[in-house]
Image: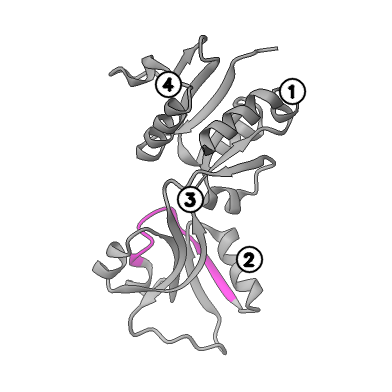
Amino acid sequence: MDRMMNIALPKGRLGEKVYQRLKAAGYPCPSIEEENRRLIFENPEAGVRYFWVKPSDVAIYVERGAADVGVAGKDILLEYSPDVYELADLGLGKCRMCVAARREFRDRPDRVLRVATKFPQIAARYYGSLSRDIDIIKLNGSIEIAPILGLSDVIVDIVETGKTLLENGLEPRETIVPISARLIANKVSYKFKHQQIAELCGRVEA
């Protein structure tokens, strides 16, 4: 069995912060800090192999066993419900999943609410818990313009500072759930590399 620990990191700022946390915890990999376009890096002395993947794909690599552990946003875990273990909240990439609308919008419960979002499962569960009839409009980007152009009444999206909303004449109405980066593990790896994974989790949390 491969004794190296395969770790999927999300590309971008969050992944870089996560790598610094792992490096400080005793899992450095000098080649990852060099200027290059490689995607896979390993340090046999530290027993780790890192690879960069699209943030929304981290959970797939972990669930399917290509990675033993990885770091994914709580939004991804809630939206796609991957079959993985969630080990720790790293407290990085903090934001929140919100409902936002135009300032003048007033909800009328007798009407079907049109909701534009990249997160249809999260939106459906939230409004289902309120027994509210909704029409979900799945979009892949620029969600904020949907209410402005009359495509939707509200949006469900990730809000960090709220600045983009304000600049587009929207305001957050309700917070659905706080979001942050989570350390996740493949279930089979967790069984066979339990000691390594538990040690990594403990060091990263410390």
Q: Are marks 3 and 1 in contact (CB under 8 Å)?
A: no
Q: Amino acid at mark 4?
A: Leu
- Tell me the quarter of the picture where residue 131 sits: bottom right
Give how far apart the Cα atoms at labels 3 and 4 are: 24 Å
Q: Secondary structure at mark 4?
A: loop
Q: Secondary structure at mark 3?
A: loop
Q: Secondary structure at mark 1?
A: helix
Discs 3/4, front:
3
Task: Give residue 45's position: percent from left, percent from top.
Answer: 51, 9
As for residue 43 lying within the magenta part, the answer is no
Give how far apart the Cα atoms at labels 1 and 2 are: 34 Å
Which residue in the protein does label 2 denote? 125
Which residue in the protein does label 1 denote? 192
The magenta span reads 134-145
Which residue in the protein does label 4 denote? 39
Q: Determine crowd level at label 1: few under 14, some 14-19, many 20+ residues with C-alpha closer than 10 A.
A: few
Give how far apart the Cα atoms at labels 2 and 3 are: 19 Å
Q: Secondary structure at mark 2?
A: helix
Q: Amino acid at mark 2?
A: Arg
Q: Determine crowd level at label 3: few under 14, some 14-19, many 20+ residues with C-alpha closer than 10 A.
A: some
Label 3 or label 1, whichever comes before in sequence order: 3
Quarter of the image with the N terminus in it: top right
Label 4 or label 1, whichever comes before in sequence order: 4
As for residue 140 lying within the magenta part, the answer is yes
Q: From the viewer's perspective, is residue 109 above or below residue 181?
A: below
Q: Amino acid at mark 3?
A: Ser
Task: Between residue 6 and residue 146, name the one nearer to us.
Answer: 6
Discs 1/2, front:
1
Which mark, residue 139? none
Which residue in the protein does label 3 denote? 180
Task: Between residue 44 and residue 96, name the one nearer to us.
Answer: 44
Residue, x 48% and y 12% (percent of image)?
A: 43
